[in-house]
Image (cartoon, rainbow, N blue to C red):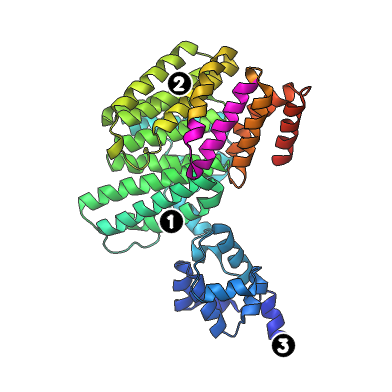
Amino acid sequence: MDTDADRDDTHGRIDPEVWEGHEMRDALAARDISEVYRQLRRHGISQRQIAAMTGQSQSEVSEILKGRQVMAYDVLSRICQGLGIRPGYMGLAYDEATRNEVVGTTGEQQAEEDESVKRRKFLAHAAQVTMGAAVFGPTSSAWATNPARTPAPGRIGVTDVRQVEAATRALRALDYQYGGGFCRDAVVAQLSWGQQMLQAGGTEQVKSRLFVALADLHSLAGWTSFDIDLVDSARNHFAQALDLAKHGENNPLVANILYRMGRVYLHQEAPDDALKLFQLGQLAAQDSGSELAVAVLCANEAWAYAMMGNEEQAVKLLGRTKDEFARADLANAESWVRFFDETDVHAMVGTVHTALAQHVDPNHSRYAIPALRRATDSYGEDMARSKTFSLSMLATNHLLEGDIDHGAKVGGKALDCAEGLKSARVEKRMEPLKHEAQRRSNNSDARDLAERMNQFFA
């Protein structure tokens, strides 16, 4: 028979002091769930009680106690919620103080500002960082504040910076495969730890490398925030990333950050604002001497021009994208731009011609389809989000050409690929496909696709 204490524990009423012990906090910080469960057993919590509180089976709990690692973010979150652990203890979320340190306070005024005003402020900040002068307006330091930081370690070396770089690479891979919603909290938590090192001592070489590493991590935080439609948070992270990249004297990264913020504005259907950021990024890319960075900016400028209906400039910039990419040193590319390989070039060619087919001339579909087909054939499971976008555009072009049956079939593949992605961008990027399918609702395949899309995004 269960005791009253057993029943309380089964309902998640573990004494909060259990989580404050030194050994328990170390285990939580390392996400060593095996050790967490072993310590709970020492506090008299049975396997059955742990299973009941976490929603796991007793066999799962037993396997974890024997050493099986728990890596999945959603499982870790469920364990925290079930056992009453503060998510921040495992780096899964952060409290108000950490939020202010990592993201910066935004205040009432910014919350009430119009989006166009925020865009102008970011552009002013980007111009100031990139060119060293407030070209487009006054400084925007008021919305990119730097609150007091947690006391830093005394001294850092190259190994500490490498840890930040390795974490960023791993988290970026998760973003590519599963979407920003899967890993954003982990990225922000990693920033909370990494930014402490800014106050630490170290050689100039180490500190410069740290600036670049944290700039890249802030850029990833901005990108994952954007992917789940947290635009203000994305903008703050990108602003801080720009400052750090400039301190680290890394122009290719400055260019990459501006490209990513420009993509936010393309997503908001503000191609003129996006183009301004891409052009600023192009200045940094050209100063860096990185042909690959230049190629990325050219491709995205082409996309902006296509959305604005400027066919001549879009096609011209696509040509330059291919030329710059052909000269690029892919083997020695930095991690933040390494994604832009031959497959991505095909995807961008298809993207630009898709935009031209929608905004200028449907005949551009004949150029979009072969490029997108090559991209979708090359993307693997590790690039599920990019593959979803390309399949969606490929299906849209087939519908534009009147190949409705095949377009509906490819559209179905896009939805299959989108399964499991934690990305708010997916629905937005698939809106043209849904629109074209609904326009052809007299065709049963198109009608079925539209209905499936409505159900998928309901």
Q: Is residue 396 magenta?
A: yes
Residue 388, percent across and down? 56, 36
Q: Quadrant of the N terminus?
A: bottom right
Give, as a three-letter code, the residue at label 3.
Thr
Residue 141 to residue 48: above or below: above
Query: At numbered mark 2, what does the secondary structure look like: helix, strand or loop?
Result: helix
Question: Is label 3 or label 1 in front?
Answer: 3
Of callouts 1 and 2, which one flags the residue occurring earlier in the amino acid sequence? 1
Q: Which residues are magenta?
A: 375-399
Give, as a three-letter code, the residue at label 1.
Gln
Few, some or many residues within 10 Å of mark 2 (<14, 14–19, 20+): many
At x 63% / y 17%, what residue is drawn?
401
Which residue lies under the disc numbered 3?
3
Quadrant of the rendered structure where residue 445 is? top right
Which residue lies under the disc numbered 1?
190
Q: How many numbered marks are there?
A: 3
Q: Are marks 2 and 3 in contact (CB under 8 Å)?
A: no
At x 26% / y 51%, what residue is drawn?
207
Give, as a three-letter code, the residue at label 2.
Ala
Q: CA distance from mark 3 to mark 1?
A: 41 Å
Q: In the rendering, which numbered label is found on residue 302? A: 2
Quadrant of the rendered structure where residue 337 is? top left
